[in-house]
Image (cartoon, rainbow, N blue to C red):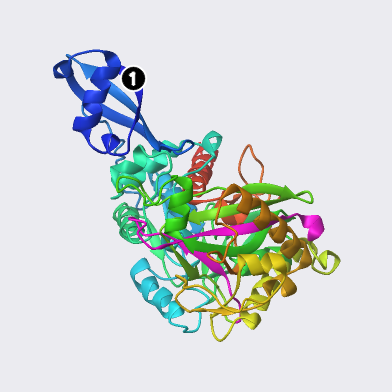
Amino acid sequence: MTQITLTLSPQAASDEKYYLSEAALFLKIDPKIITGIRVLKRSIDARGKKVNINLKCEVYIDEKMPAYQSEQIQYENVTGKPEIIIVGAGPAGLFAALHLIEKGLKPIILERGKPVSERKRDVAQISRNQPVNPDSNYCFGEGGAGTFSDGKLYTRSQKRGNTQRILEILKQHGADESILTEAHPHIGTNLLPRIIIKIRETILQSGGEIHFDTRVSDFIVENSEIKGVITQNGDKILGRSVILATGHSARDIYEKLNEREITLQAKAFAMGVRVEHPQGLIDSVQYSCEIRDEYLPAAAYSLVTQVENRGVYSFCMCPGGFIVPAATAPGELVLNGMSPSKRNSQFANSGLVVEIQPEDFPEKEKYGVLAGLHFQREFERMAFLNGGHNLTAPAQLLTDFVKGKLSQHLPETSYHPGIISSPMHFWFPEMISKRLQIGFKEFGNKIPGFLSEHGVAIGVESRTSSPVRIPRNEETLQHISVKNLYPCGEGAGYAGGIVSAAVDGERCAEMIALSRK
């Protein structure tokens, strides 16, 4: 076996009969002696005028190609084993549960929201301008925020754990095997729910427990050691350890921890807008073409600059996607983006956000460590008040945002509740609006057509990450002052997406298992 990297046209990279013959040419051998070829990694190179696909391959010559050995984890039954409480059924919580089962421990997941099938109905109601259910929405419920927000699996957190293992477990539970080879793997919001359901089935069949509609309202702490939790109904649930994997939108958890004087830290996060363009415009610029090749996926972009010592950057770019309402309480407006597996919407959207550091928080003397949370909440309330009715979102052409004037017309949008013209440049906090104006100009220079009447800013994108960190000992992963409490995932400030949250969940489960030896 030998490994090679081929640079091919999109069509040639789409079919094995094409790239097998190209491999033979590359190796200067007769294609008949190639007994097998396996793609290890696939990536797009669109830097030049001609778009190429890079394929890293294993080529087998005059030898049998071994079957691909995908990791198939056998989950034993943990009924009657020591019980570990997991608060939250997002990727951090679910993968923590799976790993606890591997280690012979019984997970008890407490999820404030509903199973994914019931959650779908609540999410659909939100898009029809119905009131937001604070416990069942785009952020809360089985699978967490990632279930209905795209399913991107790319992460830069390679040093934190085995990300390939996470992809293998997702494949074991029904994800397409392409996620193992794509440079930027993606499942799609239309396919993720069935994978989440299969993970749930694995946990339940192995003797774990999952309790939906069960919101944690307090913590049982004695002598600086957590003993369990209290639910909204007053029920006490005890466990040997507690993994806190609530996600970055569980504000009531931060407030309860702060009330109980359990140490928190303010951290940087980012806020701004969702920017939407026709997907065809992004395709034409990124692929240097008039019409996208049928063998190429919808094009994406990644933008970043520095404005007055703060980062301004794109976040959660959704090619061929939709903008959705992601508020978790009435009277607030929050946007997020998602893409189906085929990424076949006519729109491209991305968060365009400004970095905010703890020293930037207004009223930090009044709210202390939760000042960023209050700033975030007020930003969302302003967006709601400056929208039309219910969840109609304020919007402004990018060109008008930069010029500081109200838009007289707005383009068609993927945002189902609708948009209304609003002078966002005026009512946004100046430290955000000023930096966005400068950032939009710079991005317009990088992507022709970006800063045009085809681009619209829709408000607001505010949940890029948690404004609070729950500090932990990096050797034990326990909270720095509460024994057996394991802050985990995005909500604790230690992850930033499905895969990194899943990795962090496994790490916390691993440390709990080690602590019991």
Q: Residue at x 31, y 40 (%)?
A: 73
Taking depth in this image into account, of 352 and 171 the one nearest to the observer is 352
Q: Which corner quadrant of the image does residue 65 belong to? A: top left
The stretch drawn in magenta includes residue 483: no
Quadrant position of the N terminus in the picture: top left
User: Is residue 176 depicted above or below 219 in this figure?
Assistant: above
Place of residue 220 in the rendered image (x, y in percent of width and height, measured from the top left) = 62, 63
* Amino acid marked by disc 1: Gln
Q: Residue at x 68, y 77 (%)?
A: 382
Tell me the residue that label 1 is attached to.
Answer: 3
User: Is residue 311 depicted above or below 381 in this figure?
Assistant: above
Place of residue 306 in the rendered image (x, y in percent of width and height, measured from the top left) = 72, 47
132 displayed left or right of 441: left
The stretch drawn in magenta includes residue 332: yes
Q: Range of the magenta residues?
A: 331-360
Taking depth in this image into account, of 412 and 4 the one nearest to the observer is 412
Place of residue 287 in the rendered image (x, y in percent of width and height, measured from the top left) = 43, 45
Q: Furthest-left residue in view? A: 32
Residue count near mark 1 (Cα–Cα under 10 Å), binned few <14, some 14–19, many ≥20: some
196 displayed left or right of 380: left
Callout 1: helix, strand or loop?
Answer: strand
66 displayed left or right of 300: left
135 displayed left or right of 248: left
Place of residue 390 in the rendered image (x, y in percent of width and height, measured from the top left) = 54, 85
Taking depth in this image into account, of 18 and 242 the one nearest to the observer is 18
